[in-house]
Structures are given as structure tokens and as C-alpha cells.
Image (cartoon, grey):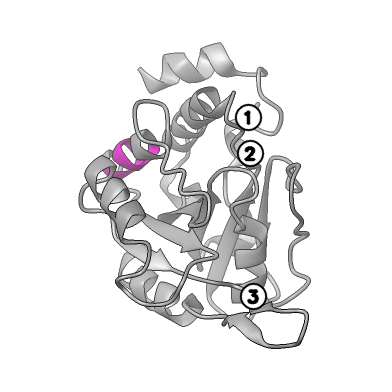
Amino acid sequence: MLGKAWGALRGALPGLSRSRAVAAPDWAADRGRILLVGPTGAGKSTLVNAVLGDGTASAGAGAPVTEGTTWYGEASPLPLALGDTRGLEAAESAAQVAAFEASLAALSAERRPHLVWLVINAEGGRSFAGTGTLAGLAASTGAAGMPCLVVLTHAEPGAESHARLRQRIAETMPGVAIAAVNSRALVGEDGAVLLPAHGVEELLDLSQPFLPEGP
């Protein structure tokens, strides 16, 4: 069924017209491969920079910065490859998610991500519940052997933060773990830290069991 869906969508969406759009490159063969998926402005590129170093990926606010899928980490000492994808747009998210599902299903094992980070801005609270959304993607990739984690960005620290949003996510994505992250400290005009950077190490620790062991 996914194959038929992919055939119907081929060429319809920029950056997703070939299965290789999400395929990991050759240099990532021996690394833990993580694909980042989420709405525009969720902070996927900023998260890449927090893990692999500032300046790794172009990041910005508003319109999508990333076109298609770009894999990062070739020069990093970390045994990771992070695939930064074009942000999901509200009017097109169902079609975009369907294209992701089909393209991932078409990949060989050595080209597939080991893990998918579903990135959601905690301030906006969009959990994309329902068919053809991030919840649907979590279900389909999980069934295909690619587990997901939800990453709440711009999030307050602590396991009890954003309780209502966590509850909505738990209801739509049962069993999917949630990590709260703020990739870059939020500083006020007076220089005071309003929201500290936190959660990246915890996210990597939570991701580790889903990734292959190093040499």
C-alpha cells in the first residue's frame, strides 16, 4: 500500500521526489542514523547544531530553511548522522507525512534511519494527532522497525513540564518516549537567563538504546 501511495505522490512535493531524499549517505553506514521530522519552526536545524556544533546546519525562524533532506555529521567525532528534513506545513502535512512513510518504506536497511525524532515546539503545542500526521508517522515507522522519540523543543526543564501537551502526545502516540529540550539559552534584554539550555545530553541518552553499538 505504501508503494502505491509513493507512486501517486512521486514528483508532487519538493525534496521528496525520490526515495534517496531521505536515504542516508555512504559515510553514515557505520553511524547511528537519526531522521528529524516536524513542523516548520519546531527547531530541527537548531537541534542539529546543539548536537553536532554551532554552524553545522542553517537555522532560522518562519519560512522553512531546510529544503529536502540534508544529512550532517560526517566530520563529527560523534558516531551519529542526523538527517534534517524540510518542515511540515499545516496545509500539506498529511501529504508530506504520507511521502515520508512511503520513501522510508522503500529504503534498504543500510540506508534507513535507526531512529526518528519527531520534533514539536512545546510553545506551540501542535502534536499532529490523527491519520497522516506525526502520530501516523510514528505508528507506520514503528511497524517498519524504525522507532520514534518525541522531542519537545523550547521546553521548560523537568519531567513534569508541559504536562497537558505530554498527555495529548501520550494519547495519540502511545508508548513513544518524550524528551524535553531547549537547544539554546533564552536570554532577556538585561542579560538574565530566562530559560537555560538543557536536555540535549538526556535526549542522546534516551536515543542510545535504539542505535547500533560502536566498533
Q: Is residue 206 left or right of residue 157?
A: left
Indicate the position of residue 53 as horizontal and vertical percent values: 69, 77
Mark 2 surroundings within 10 Å by alpha-carbon count, few (fewer than 14), some (14 through 19), many (20 or more): some
Quadrant where the N terminus sits is top left
* The image quarter in which residue 131 lies: top left
Report the span colored magenta. 137-142
- Tag 2–tag 1 contact (CB < 8 Å): yes
Crowd tier of the residue under label 1, counting other residues whose Cα lies within 10 Å: few below 14, some 14–19, many 20 or above: some
Residue 64 tag number: none
**Amino acid at dot 3:** Arg
Q: Give me the residue at 64% from left, 44% from top.
A: 40
Residue at 35% x, 53% y is: 165
Residue ID for mark 2 = 21
Residue 2 sits above or below residue 16 on the image:
above
Q: Which of the two labelled residues, at mark 3 and mark 2, occupies the earlier sequence position? A: 2
> Distance of mark 3 from mark 2, alpha carbons?
28 Å
Residue tagged 1: 18
Asked if residue 114 can be seen in this view, the reply is: no
Helix, strand, or loop for circle 2?
helix
Residue drawn where x is 58% and y is 24% of the image: 92
Magenta run includes residue 140 = yes
* Image quadrant where one finds the C terminus: bottom left
Q: Looking at the image, which residue sits at the far front?
A: 190
Q: Which residue is mark 3?
A: 184
**Looking at the picture, how far across and down is residue 3, in whole percent?**
43, 20
Location of residue 9 (image quadrant): top right
What is the C-alpha distance between the residues marked 1 and 3? 34 Å
Task: Tell which tag, 1 or 3, sits nearer the viewer.
Answer: 3
For the question of whether residue 68 can be seen, the reply is yes
